[in-house]
């Protein structure tokens, strides 16, 4: 990054190594950084546990850790403050005196003291509009208003008479430059809570250090061939592919289910394999999927590998099951299956070469797959006497195609479909019973007569 007051340096593995002042502006104060990483992409001279969590900023042998974690790699203790999480991985308590109360989203709606009182200064209630924090109310009904930038970072907090209580600028990787600060606001860089005890930002799945410009724990990702198209994603500590002024990491886990969530989850379970279903959890309110891949061999399970890729992606994918789907243009009927938006070549012969609102996923979603399990109009039967496609393989195929379109940057339908077929054939090789079925949305592999017909019902 160059041109403002910053020059950032990265090593070839995507580790942020140096931040220094722009030579054109010598003496301009910046939060400078100089660090190097070892062959695990961990900072040389810092201490990590075997799971890849940062224990402290001192070299091995590690002294008493600055950061302690539980078996789920959640930060549980730092600077004398203990954190407690709920079953969805949301932090619900800080032993220093805060309970967090959540609504449907990933951000707390209320904060109280440990007794849950709404009648003292510890009580704060947050107001969101379209997912963004816009206001905070205290126990005396005083309201403060939030003004954020394009990343959702809080730049100004003002009271109801317009007096500016907080005014801060932020460096690209989240360091704060305070101009005024009197509202007591902790929700700063990209709207995440900055803990005063540690200086770290709570990103839900992991904590982020704006001082180091990286996460303090590794992404639980396993390397797949697709990741080599975008090697920046191979670094498990890097923040938003080291492009912090453009990208945001709202939760770190970005596959969501909609429509009939129970049906959608059941399809996902079959995709990862019934034995692995308990590894999948779905947030009831938001539909956000988490998938525990610990000790799972993703190279032997194309279904689990795909779900892991979709979750680890910086893009948001949505899978909806049911007769209708919510698009940017409202509710739309689903005939068998939809994969939104259409690819460039599917649009090229139209007058307007852009998808209609009803072909565009709803806001914040990069690609949306909608499946109607009750509509068999599109069920395809091959000429090679294969049995009908198993429904979950259809879903698998479309999700793989969506991933190829977005993360694989495949612009044409044929290329995205081809990438999906490749993954689908791998799945069929791993699950012998699938071999007698027609692949989800394509013809059987390696057969001359692989034309498919639409079965009319
Ligand atoms: Zn396809």
Image (cartoon, rainbow, N blue to C red):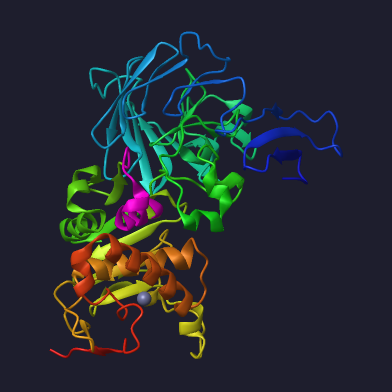
Position of 179 with respect to 453 (left or right) is right
> With respect to residue 115, does 307 lie above or below?
below
Q: Residue at x 26, y 41 (%)?
A: 103
Q: Quadrant of the N terminus?
A: top right
Q: Is residue 42 left or right of residue 97?
A: right
The structure residue drawn at horizontal position 64% and vertical position 40%, both measured from the top left corner, is 172
Q: Quadrant of residue 92?
A: top left
Position of 156 relative to 93 (above/below): below
Return the x and y of residue 317 as percentages of the image width and height.
38, 59
Front residue of 92 and 47: 47
Magenta stretch? 293-309
**Quarter of the figure with the C terminus:** bottom left
In percent of width and height, residue 341 lies at 42, 73
User: Which residue is found at the position 57% from the left and 34% from the top?
Assistant: 41
Whether residue 361 is in magenta: the answer is no
Count of marks, rendered view: 0
Q: Position of residue 293 (x, y in %)?
A: 32, 42
Q: Residue at x 47, y 51 (%)?
A: 314
Q: Is residue 150 visible?
A: no
Residue 302 within the segment the image draws in magenta: yes
Main SS class of the magenta portion in the image: helix
Judging depth in this view, the residue of 221 and 339 nearest the camera is 221
Snapshot quadrant of residue 51: top left
Compared to residue 427, the image places residue 166 above or below, namely: above
Ligand 1 location (quadrant): bottom left
In the rendered image, residue 448, in percent from the top left (x then y), is placed at 35, 88
């Amino acid at each position: 990054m160059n041109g403002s007051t910053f020059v950032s340096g990265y090593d070839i593995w995507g580790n942020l190594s140096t931040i220094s002042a722009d030579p054109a502006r010598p003496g301009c104060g910046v939060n400078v950084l100089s660090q190097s990483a070892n062959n695990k992409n961990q900072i040389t001279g810092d201490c990590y546990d075997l799971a890849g969590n940062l224990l402290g900023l001192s070299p091995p042998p590690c002294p008493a850790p600055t950061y302690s974690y539980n078996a789920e790699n959640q930060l549980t203790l730092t600077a004398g403050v203990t954190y407690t999480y709920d079953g969805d991985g949301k932090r619900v308590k800080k032993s220093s005196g805060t309970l967090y109360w959540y609504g449907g989203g990933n951000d707390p709606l209320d904060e109280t003291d440990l007794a849950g009182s709404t009648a003292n200064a510890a009580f704060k209630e947050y107001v969101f509009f379209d997912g963004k924090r816009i206001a905070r109310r205290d126990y005396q009904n005083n309201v403060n208003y939030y003004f954020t930038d394009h990343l959702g970072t809080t730049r100004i907090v003002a009271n109801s008479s317009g007096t500016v209580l907080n005014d801060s600028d932020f460096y690209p990787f989240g360091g704060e430059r305070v101009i005024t600060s009197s509202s007591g606001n902790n929700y700063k860089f990209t709207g995440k809570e900055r803990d005063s005890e540690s200086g770290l930002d709570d990103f839900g799945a992991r904590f982020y250090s704006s001082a180091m410009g990286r996460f303090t724990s590794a992404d639980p990702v396993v390397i797949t061939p697709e990741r080599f198209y975008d090697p920046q994603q191979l670094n498990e500590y890097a923040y938003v592919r080291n492009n912090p002024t453009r990208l945001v990491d709202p939760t770190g886990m970005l596959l969501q289910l909609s429509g009939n969530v129970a049906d959608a989850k059941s399809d996902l379970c079959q995709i990862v394999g019934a034995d692995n279903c308990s590894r999948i959890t779905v947030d009831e309110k938001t539909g956000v999927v988490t998938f525990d891949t610990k000790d799972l061999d993703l190279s032997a399970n194309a279904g689990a590998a795909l779900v892991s890729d979709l979750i680890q992606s910086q893009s948001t994918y949505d899978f909806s099951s049911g007769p209708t789907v919510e698009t940017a243009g409202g509710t739309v009927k689903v005939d068998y299956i939809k994969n939104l938006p259409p690819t460039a070549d599917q649009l090229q012969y139209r007058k307007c070469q852009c998808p209609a609102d009803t072909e565009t996923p709803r806001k914040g979603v990069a690609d949306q797959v909608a499946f109607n399990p009750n509509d068999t109009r599109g069920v395809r039967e091959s000429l090679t006497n294969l049995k009908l496609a198993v429904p979950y393989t259809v879903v698998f195929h479309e999700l793989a195609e969506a991933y190829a379109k977005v993360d694989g940057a495949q612009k044409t339908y044929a290329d995205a479909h081809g990438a999906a077929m490749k993954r689908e054939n791998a799945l069929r090789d791993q699950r012998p019973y699938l071999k007698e079925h027609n692949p989800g949305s394509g013809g059987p592999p390696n057969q001359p007569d692989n034309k498919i017909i639409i079965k009319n019902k």
